[in-house]
Amino acid sequence: MNYKNYPMVSRVVFGRGSFNQLGDIISPKRKNIKAPFIFLVDDVFKGNSWLTSRIPIAYNDQLLYISAEEEPKTSQVDELVEQIILSHKDRPSGIIGIGGGTILDLAKAVAILLTNEGEAKNYQGWDLVKMPAIYHVGVPTISGTGAEVSRTTVLTGPDKKLGINSDYTPFDQVILDPELAKDVPKNQWFYTGMDCYIHCIESLNGTYLNAFSQSYGEKAYQLCLEIFVEDNLTEEESQDKLMMASWHGGMSIAYSQVGVAHAMSYGLSYLLGTKHGIGNCIVFDHLEEFYPDGVKLFKQMKQKHNIKLPQGLCDNLSDEEFDIMIDVALSLEPLWINAVGKNWKQIITRDKLKGLYQKM
Ligand code: NAD
Ligand code: ZN
């Protein structure tokens, strides 16, 4: 058995208002006044001086607002890298991503592609990155994906949706300031929060489970119960705890895998552009046979928070379109092995997946 030697985020700050320390934290990393910091910021914060006035811009630093409307694409990473190279003589001192999973993943990918030749799509997979990335910092503004702590950056490329999984992907620095999540809309809070809950259920019920993953998964699960079920926390406590649940949920899948909801939601996302959080919710709602207790509780949380999931997504799809989603889902072999075991191909047939998709 060859055990994975797993890299982790090397530095992390936690606390309400810790975002104020960003300037002090990054300034020792400035290589020279011509080597800028590039801030990739979710455009939901455009005009929001409460946040943007605290972004420590100096010298040739550049702030780029980025829409999180669509999930990150390999072509978008390539364009950003080109734009950065063309605008600055010196290679940047660092990339700072401020936003949700979409922006965090873009920041990680841009940092990698600034030091690794060629196009982003060439690095989708496992351990294809050769050179260390540029110093990169993640500042999550919504909690649940675990993108702040993970070893991957999930990108949609011309022929697949797959992460750049590498030892150089994790952030060098993360700033966990739960206050930044204070204006997240309720539905989005639920969808992204449920991504964390589903990470726990898929990891804790998977064949890859081990004490490392379990210890993180159980903690994240317990925090999700406090936040979404018991519901006797103040708003601030709830933001604090969800930020840590996201972190632990991400750590839990680091040393195991996700499962059925993620495999099938990748299919929805690839064909229909359904975003990760809501897509996972739509799929998970129909997975009683795989995760009976997890789905039962999910339905309770949905009701408690008055969340109405979209229905009929697949009503008008052609056979070819179903095939595209099924191909994407089936290509994620480790997820199926984790979910149902080594003999997964006998259980997870194309008809089985089609039947499930038809319910969504
Ligand atoms: P997101 O980044 O797409 O953001 C969702 C919405 O919330 C957007 O409209 C955004 O503008 C808004 N938003 C974010 N912060 C806000 C704030 N403080 N106030 C108001 N609005 C705010 O959502 P997400 O669920 O965090 O991320 C999804 C992405 O994460 C997907 O692309 C998925 O593939 C990726 N992901 C990555 C990993 C990983 O390990 N790298 C894991 C899971 C998911
Ligand atoms: Zn997820």
Image (cartoon, rainbow, N blue to C red):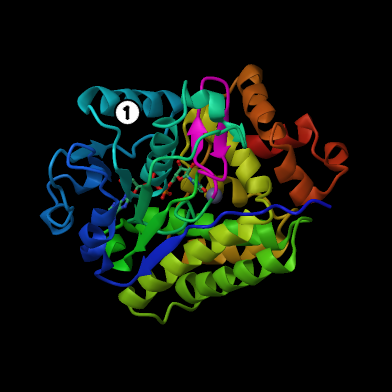
| Number of marks drawn | 1
Q: Residue furthest front?
A: 32
Q: Amino acid at mark 1?
A: Leu
User: Would residue 339 be counted in the magenta stretch?
Assistant: no
Q: Residue at x 73, y 60 (%)?
A: 205
**How packed is label 1: few (under 14 Cα within 10 Å), some, or many (20 or more)?**
some
Check disc 1 and report its element: helix, strand or loop.
helix
- Who's the residue at 49% across and 33% down the image? 155
45 lies left or right of 70 = left
Can the viewer see residue 314 in this picture?
A: no
Residue that badge 1 annotates: 80
Q: Quadrant of residue 6?
A: bottom right
Residue 25 seen in the current view: yes
Locate residue 113: give its quadrant.
top left
Decide whether residue 155 is among the magenta residues.
Answer: yes
Q: Looking at the picture, how far across and down is residue 14, in whole percent?
A: 36, 70
